[in-house]
Amino acid sequence: MRDLLQYVACCLAFFSAGFLIVATWTDCWMVNADDSLEVSTKCRGLWWECVTNAFDGIRTCDEYDSILAEHPLKLVVTRALMITANLLAALGFLSLLLGLHCVKFLPNEPLIKFRICFVAGILLVIAGVPGIVGSVWYAIDVYVERTSLVLHNIFLGIQYKFGWSCWLGMAGALGCLLAGAVLTCCLYLFKDLGPERSYAYSIRKAYSHAGVSMAKSYVPTRTETAKMYAVDTRV
């Protein structure tokens, strides 16, 4: 059961870290809504903006200004949160690889490998927090901005909704939280069913067999005086 939980958490961590990285470095956090007057598909990401012509499919992208330039608050904060989530998720996944039972790293130290998996789970949980905060906050900000324009009857010709990159960031963050929960909570519940218990049991069993064999091999020898007393009692 322990090995199965480790493999499930490893798969979740792999895909979740990949989702976070792809979401951070793609350009579709915001996409023009269906009710816009644009004939092209316009996507905005954290680093650049791309426009795809609906007729010929030509795609052009423009990078934003320098990182040191002034940007909207939601863009700066989302960048910081997603980069932090990427680093922590990658570190947690690599740590989890070292803690897997099938990896030949510290094969005679199952307790240390269990602790490595536990630390990897904590890293993944921490990675999921900035990921979910950044992507959800970005989506809420886009929704609030669009709703406020509609409520005030302001129509700018183009309206945005959150795109697939934002959804991918949410999925990656939730996957990291789930993988971390499996490694920290579920794996801890089954800690007595892991290989370290059987390893300790085999050591105790070997010592017990050795003690029994030594006890059986020890036969006390009789001295000459004991033999004389034994003869006298038989007479």
Image (cartoon, grey):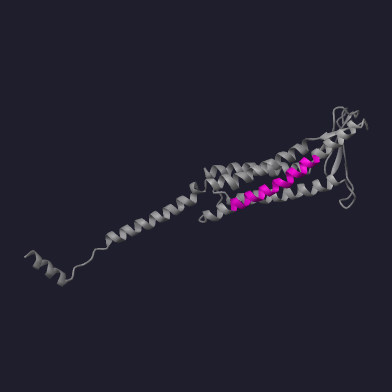
Residue 145 rendering spot, x and y as whole percentages: 86, 37
Residue at x-position 85% and y-position 47%: 73
Q: Position of residue 130 (x, y in %)?
A: 74, 47
Q: Kindly report the secondary structure that dominates the magenta region of the rendered protein.
A: helix
The answer to whether 117 is drawn above or below residue 33 in the figure is: below
Whether 141 is drawn above or below 200: the answer is above
Placement of 71 over or under 211, stated as above or below: above
Residue that extends furthest to the left in the rendered view of this protein: 235
Which residue occupies 27% across, 59% down? 216
Residue 229 lies left or right of residue 198; in this view the side is left
Q: Where residue 37 appears, x then y in whole percent? A: 91, 28
Q: Quadrant of residue 128?
A: top right
Residue 143: image location, x then y, percent: 83, 35
Residue under the image location 83 percent in, 41 percent down: 45
Residue 60 in view: yes
| 210 displayed left or right of 16 | left
Residue 105, visible in the rendered structure = no
Give the magenta range: 116-138
Name the residue at the bottom extreme.
Answer: 225
For this rendering, which residue is in front, 134 or 15?
Answer: 134
Instruction: Tell me the quarter of the picture where residue 150 sits.
Output: top right
Which quadrant would residue 141 be assigned to in this image? top right
Q: Is residue 137 magenta?
A: yes
Looking at the rendered structure, the number of numbered marks drawn on it comes to: 0
Position of residue 165 in the picture relative to residue 185 (left or right) = right
Q: Quadrant of the C terminus?
A: bottom left
- Point out the residue furthest to the front here: 151
Say whether residue 118 is magenta: yes
